[in-house]
Image (cartoon, rainbow, N blue to C red):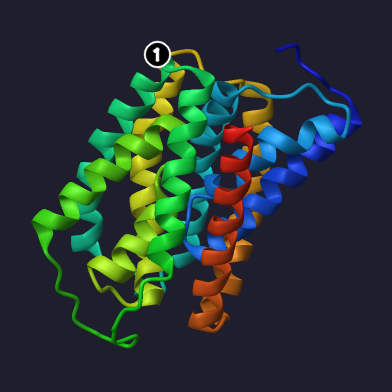
Amino acid sequence: MEIDLSLMYLTVIFALGFIGSFLSGMLGVGGSIIKYPLLLYIPPLFGLVAFTAHEVSGISAVQVLFASLAGVWAYRKSGLLNRELILYMGVAILIGSFIGSYGSGFLSEDAVNIVYGLLAVTAAVMMFIPRKTVEDATEISFNKALASILALIVGIGSGIVGAAGGFLLVPIMLTVLKIPTRITIATSLAITFISSIGGSVGKVMTGQVDYWPAFIMIIASIIAAPLGAKVGQKMNVKILQWLLALMIGATAIKIWIDILQ
């Protein structure tokens, strides 16, 4: 893709990065669940050249590295980052994300979109599963083997679409591992950051990264993610859950409509 330095291009890419990163910091996801369709569908509406699915996944992978790091930094003194969860799920998702992101270079455009659609539908369904969780629990216990296996699977799938897996980690941690919501949101950002390292390396190695728009979105994420994290710490837990569920659900519907056309 040729480099476009127009004011329109800079404004649109920055705005998409800002919106996605603000939501990522607020909801504890890497932001790709919303940035993937935004980058795929919005630029052509402004007369800009459309990104391919591979370019979108590459840009998302690199940008998510910085968005999640900025979000984790905002949570560093909150006491909500669970080190045990970060260790077990982080190592597994790092391995999975590298495998998925490297392997995605050999997949077709439609295949990348289909994987994204499957991940989004799975996450949306999981967010609506009834659960019993003590929101103010001080001691966290979880199945370490199950957490590691699920993180590995999430890493492979999310690595393919450059998503780092935050949007799947949140519902898994809430519904399967029974982790309190606020700890889930903060800790999932740290795991997402680890995942994005493997995802970024795989995308760069297979030449899927368009560096100029990635740089613009990184700047936007460094500004927006900490702001979103601060808002998220003050918001009602139920509102956060519904926002995430609605965001994922709407994205899943849109992507499947396009795949099936």
The kind of residue tagged 1 is: Phe
Query: Where residue 3 appears, x then y in whole percent?
Result: 76, 15
Query: Where residue 114 appears, x then y in whole percent?
Result: 47, 33
Whether residue 153 appears in this view of the structure is yes
Q: Residue at x 56, y 41 (%)?
A: 256
Report the front residue among 223 and 4.
4
Callout 1: helix, strand or loop? helix
Would you place residue 240 above or below residue 109 in this image?
below
| Quadrant (top left, top right, bottom left, bottom right) of the C terminus | top right
Would you place residue 255 above or below residue 77 in this image?
above
Q: Residue furthest front?
A: 261
Q: Residue at x 81, y 19 (%)?
A: 4
Judge left or right: residue 198 versus residue 84: right
Report the front residue among 259 and 224.
259
Whether residue 76 appears in this view of the structure is no
Query: Where residue 117 appears, x then y in whole percent?
Result: 49, 41
Judge left or right: residue 221 versus residue 139: right
Q: Residue at x 68, y 42 (%)?
A: 38
Query: Number of numbered discs present?
Result: 1
Judge left or right: residue 216 versus residue 46: left
Would you place residue 211 above or below residue 134 in this image?
above
Judge left or right: residue 164 versus residue 216: left
Q: What residue is disc 1 on?
A: 106
Report the front residue among 206 and 34.
34
Report the front residue among 92 and 158.
158
Packing grade of label 1 (10 A; few <14, some 14-19, many >=20) is: few
Q: Residue at x 54, y 44 (%)?
A: 32
Query: Where residue 88 appears, x then y in whole percent?
Result: 17, 53
